Amino acid sequence: MRARDGTPVSSMKSRVTAQQVADMAGVSRSAVSRCFGDGLVSEETRKRIMAASEALGYRPNVIARSLTGQNTGLVALLLAELENPHTDLVLKKLLVAIAEADRRALVIPETRQHDLTSSTMHALDYQVDAIVVMGGTVSDHVVDRLRALDTPVFQFGRQIEGLGGVACDNRLGGLMGGRFLVQSGRRRIAYVTKTAQTDANRRRRAGLAAALEDAGLPFMEEESEDNSFEGGYNAATRLFARSDRPDALFCFNDIIALGALQAAATFRLRVPEDVAVLGFDDIPMASWPAFGLSSLRPNLDSQVGRLMAMIEGIGKGSPPNREVDLVLPELVVRRTAV
Amino acid sequence: MRARDGTPVSSMKSRVTAQQVADMAGVSRSAVSRCFGDGLVSEETRKRIMAASEALGYRPNVIARSLTGQNTGLVALLLAELENPHTDLVLKKLLVAIAEADRRALVIPETRQHDLTSSTMHALDYQVDAIVVMGGTVSDHVVDRLRALDTPVFQFGRQIEGLGGVACDNRLGGLMGGRFLVQSGRRRIAYVTKTAQTDANRRRRAGLAAALEDAGLPFMEEESEDNSFEGGYNAATRLFARSDRPDALFCFNDIIALGALQAAATFRLRVPEDVAVLGFDDIPMASWPAFGLSSLRPNLDSQVGRLMAMIEGIGKGSPPNREVDLVLPELVVRRTAV
DNA sequence: CTGAAAGCGCTTACAG
DNA sequence: CTGAAAGCGCTTACAG
């Protein structure tokens, strides 16, 4: 097969190998490998090899390289909770961070057919250098399996015992939000929780409960049936219909809080005068002028940075990290709770 | 190194090879390979191999397999426009579709250091079976390079000449939206465009312009400085301040439309009585009760399905697809334009 | 610093 | 249907 100009298409397209570079440079394949690897070649040889490589458009074949037990440069991202808008942001930041660290992301979502265990198998099939688990339910049994792997596994945004990683300090966030509401004079503070008793939910709730207990205030709670605008709307509606209507809502996340805001408008309640609303996650929408939602920001950049540091630290002889690095959330005060 | 129970850790952890399975099953490595490959083995042999595989927990090494010129099962997703919330949805749907097709996604975002060309190189380094380009600017020069690759390249959501793929029929969407507004009695219809003259923007605009020309109506236009809520807010504010205030806004996308809605509220304009607002993309927020935004839905599931069909069709002997498969958008009428 | 050789785990003609 | 052998493109002791 030949292109119109007569040059063989195969040579145009198919990959150049180290042997071809070696032939052209008049050195051995080993020298080419070293030149692109540990760099232990003489200056003279290096020049010749680089010239040949550039002329031929050589790039080492990562697949072949990783067969020899080298790193693949792959980081697997095991995703769950795709419906959560906060996941979008985290995912994008991780993707950019991984690319900037000159690694590639193998992204494996949880689907009907594939749970965490099968996603892990798939990741291992590609000999990834590290696995990052984001969201989803992880049973103790699975944690044990993950710990036993050769490949380092990190969790992002959760605090499962025995598995290293990085997370927002959710309990502290709950505590900070609770204290802030108390200090601003609120006395009937309700937690709008979500149905799923995730790790993050439990911890935020515990933090708030502690703040309220310190202040000698009661703990009210209402469940949002799903993790959504409408769930928040409905939960807030039930709270606002009560005779002991709360004067502040601390919502598990911003989406629920935005729904609660909408409910307040329906009840013609003034925010924050009649009722304060506080969210969690500080998603981009929170800062939209239409909302001005006060929220707790998980400091994603810091979390992502520390995670990448852990990944870069792999195989540096240090023992596997089994600790979760907690990042302090930040209270962002806008209009809905001041 | 040994675990506490005395079993060698290496045998616990490091991967089982086909040779080990072969030894245990009393067959050759070739037989094992065939059993997991084309399947040309006798029933008897298959059983023995499968039993051994399960006992040992064997999984073929994808890296080694793909070195022989096999498919890697990898699909590269080259992402740009990460700030667009529509991208989030598309990305998630693609990730799930790829996983359900039992393939893996290598996701490479555009970053400061990496443009489309370098992302492509990285994808090729991993011998991906196909490359999907999402968003971003693609020069003619780059298109030529992409076409010349051995690896099939598809575009998603755009209609670049000479590159196969799938996209929403943006021009038709513009036309449908325009006709709908005209038929509902609007006479001063403004297009709120975005600064970047992307392919999608040009086509939506052209469709609207055609609808207005058919109706003998003027074409008004206002630019949103960025592709955001605030950009939409500001652009709509300028439009509402005009003496010939428009009675309908057709916005390039939903985020801009939501900003325009906020501006209408500031001007105490009733929606849709005083001014209709129509978006594009039908992002999840559009359906939130707070907004009830009418919009054009790009039928993502259909787009993703067709793209996956193209990917599955690779190497089936058919010539490379150079056509863009256009998917009809759907008008979703909610409260802001009826 | 350099090259010949062995090997990573698999697949695939080839011969039987 | 089956196995011995060669090969995919690279890396890495090893000897010089």
Image: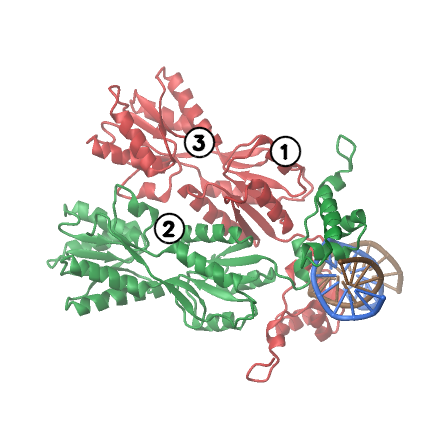
Chain colours: A red, B green, C blue, D brown
- Please tell me whether mark 2 or mark 1 is closer to you in this view: 1
Give the labeled residue for mark 2. Answer: B85
Whole-percent x, y for residue A4 in the image: 55, 84
Q: Amino acid at mark 3?
A: Ala
| Residue B190 vs residue B212, the one in the foreground | B212
Residue picked out by circle 3: A196
Q: Which amino acid type is shown beneath numbered disc 2?
A: Pro
Q: Residue A144: which numbered mark, if any?
A: 1
Q: What residue is rendered at 47% in x and 64% in y?
A: B154
Quarter of the picture holding the N terminus of chain B: top right
Residue at 21 percent across and 56 percent down: it is B249
> In what element is the residue under mark 2?
helix
Return the x and y of residue A8 as percentages of the image width and height.
Answer: 62, 80
Q: Quadrant of residue B138?
A: bottom left
Q: Is residue A12 above or below residue B232?
A: below
Q: Looking at the picture, how far across and down is residue B188, in whole percent?
A: 14, 60
Both labels 3 and 2 in a single chain: no
C-alpha span from label 3 to label 1: 23 Å
Neighbor class of circle 2 (other Cα within 10 Å; few <14, some 14-19, many 20+) is: some
The CA span between labels 3 and 2 is: 25 Å
Disc 3: host chain: A
Up the image or down, B17 lies above or below B191; here it is above
Chain of the residue under label 2 = B
Tag 1: amino acid = Asp
Near mark 3 (Cα within 10 A), the count class, few <14, some 14-19 or many ≥20, is some
Label 1: state its secondary structure.
Answer: helix
